[in-house]
Amino acid sequence: QPRVFSGIQPSGGLTLGNYLGALKRFADMQNEGNFETIYCMVDLHAITVWQDPETLKRNTRELCAGFIASGVDPEKSILFNQSQVPEHAQLAWIFNTVARMGWLNRMTQFKDKAGKNRENASVGLFAYPSLMAADILIYHATHVPVGDDQKQHLELTRDIAAKFNHDYGVDFFPITEPVIEGAATRVMSLRDGSKKMSKSDPSDMSRINMTDDADAIAGKLRKARTDPDALPSEVKGLDDRPEARNLINIYAAFADMTPEQVLADVGGKQFSEFKPMLAELAVSKLSPISSEMSRLMQDQDEIDKILRRGAERAREITEPILAKTYDIVGMVR
Ligand code: ATP
Ligand code: MG
């Protein structure tokens, strides 16, 4: 059976980008029933940039609540945090010896996150993509739903699998398919149409948080940067209008429509009319999720129990795959 793996970092509160680009699709793939689905809070990835320990714990539990409130069912899917399944880190070490410096040097996420002061970035931030390859390949996952920003890391995952198979003369790790689909594979910042919306962006006005209330959502959308023109009635009219494209894509993803269908309805409208429509739609979809998140957050023991159970189920898959990997590599057991 085809197997889905994906993860989210507990590196801050969840954003609309995480919801539309990842969580909503995780729930959809689970419910389609064609896949075994495995979803992870990647806490080991989060600490590649500094995380305050207490905040990290809180963010991990809140992220778990976010998964469940978005429709990921811990019975149907395996849901856990990465650090509790040690085979991820163990396989990542093997992959650090497979991946080449030159490959990692080309990764744009590292360049973006390290910024100008690259000498001061953590070694973990540089090696992030080999851990990500391990997350996926320790399950022999075949499909990985992600946002568009992770495409380059998934290509690297394929390169690592292929080089491992080639070097050791085996056909062991699958060549994974990225699943980058839907209208909102790259939700952009509300302040800058050339930057992706991120949890870790210093400006709270740049993003909609899944825990924002109706007033905050409406306010942020009202203030979202746009150009002065009316909306076009066809998608090609969005060329060179990144902010307009972004708001149309967000609307389309929430409404399960294509951008073409949305523009057929709203083409010709001014932003002053469209933004409140978008706010109403966003609030109607997000507010039940955020109230469910706060309800779940009241029972921390229950969340921790779900995560522990998820990790046990995950290890049933990862232990034999790591053991086989060690055999292939020549580790005496
Ligand atoms: P950080 O800023 O700490 O990297 P993030 O918001 O980018 O946080 P991640 O945990 O890195 O979140 O990514 C989790 C998933 O959400 C990935 O599949 C990623 O592609 C997706 N994602 C993140 N931001 C967006 C976005 N703006 N649009 C669509 N998908 C996104
Ligand atoms: Mg990210």
Image (tube, grey):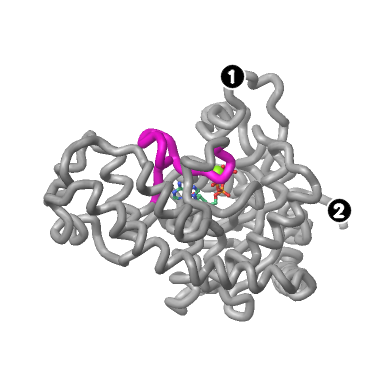
Q: Quadrant of residue 295?
A: bottom right
Residue at 82% across / 50% down in the picture?
331
Q: Secondary structure at mark 2?
A: loop
First reached walking from the N terminus: tag 1 or tag 2: 1
Residue at 17% across / 38% down in the picture?
229
What residue span does the magenta drawing correspond to? 185-201
Going by the numbered disc 2, the residue's amino acid type is Val
**Label 1 neighbour load within 10 Å: few <14, some 14-19, many 20+:** few
**Residue 95 x, y percent position in the rendering:** 67, 43
**Residue 286 x, y percent position in the rendering:** 46, 65
Going by the numbered disc 1, the residue's amino acid type is Lys
- Residue 241, compared with residue 76, is above or below; it is above
Residue at 47% across / 41% down in the picture?
206
User: Can residue 327 be seen by looking at this rendering?
Assistant: no
Ligand 2's image quarter is top right
Q: Nearer the viewer, residue 46 or 126?
A: 46
Q: Quadrant of residue 48?
A: top right
Q: Is residue 130 magenta?
A: no
Q: Which residue in the structure is indicated by mark 2?
A: 332
User: Can residue 23 be seen by looking at this rendering?
Assistant: yes
Q: Which residue in the structure is indicated by mark 1?
A: 116
**Label 2 neighbour load within 10 Å: few <14, some 14-19, many 20+:** few
**Residue 321 x, y percent position in the rendering:** 70, 62
Quadrant where the image shows the C terminus: bottom right
Characterize the magenta stretch by its predominant secondary structure.
loop
Q: CA distance from mark 1 to mark 2?
A: 43 Å
Q: Nearer the viewer, residue 93 or 292?
A: 292
Q: Secondary structure at mark 1?
A: loop
Q: Is residue 188 magenta?
A: yes
Nearer the camera: disc 1 or disc 2: 1
